[in-house]
Amino acid sequence: MRYFFHLDNENQIEDDEGVECKSANEACEYARQVAFELDAHKPEAPNHLSRIRVTDEDGKEVFRTLLKAKLGS
């Protein structure tokens, strides 16, 4: 099944390609890994919440995870 990984913050970035995963659990693990990598590489930013929202082929939300906000100087 194809799952879609949308980035929600002050702007919404919709994933229109998705990733083929064997299960919803695999899609959740993939989202956690992407969130970890984004947290590790994103520049300092104002304190705001961002998240990755995972939906299945039918548009049903199956998972969401927050990205850590970093305080700017």
Image (cartoon, rainbow, N blue to C red):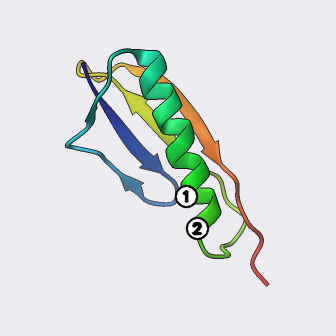
- Residue toward you, 2 or 52: 2
Could you tell me if the residues under marks 2 and 1 are in contact, i.e. CB atoms within 8 Å?
Answer: yes
Name the residue at 70% across, 59% down. 69
Q: Position of residue 24 (x, y in %)?
A: 42, 17
- Say which of 57 and 41 sits in front: 41
- Residue 71 drawn at (x, y percent): 77, 71
Q: Looking at numbered disc 2 in the image, what kind of residue is underneath it?
A: His
Question: Could you say whether the residue bearing mark 2 is in a helix, strand or loop?
Answer: helix
Q: Position of residue 51 (x, y in %)?
A: 55, 45
Taking depth in this image into account, of 17 and 22 the one nearest to the observer is: 22
Instruction: Identify the residue at horizontal 66%, vertical 73% (top origin).
Output: 45
- The residue to which callout 1 is attached is 38
Q: Amino acid at mark 1?
A: Leu
Q: CA distance from mark 2 to mark 1?
A: 5 Å
State the residue position of label 2.
Answer: 41
Q: Residue at x 48, y 17 (%)?
A: 25
Q: Quadrant of the N terminus?
A: top left
From the viewer's perspective, tell me whether residue 5 is left or right of residue 1.
right
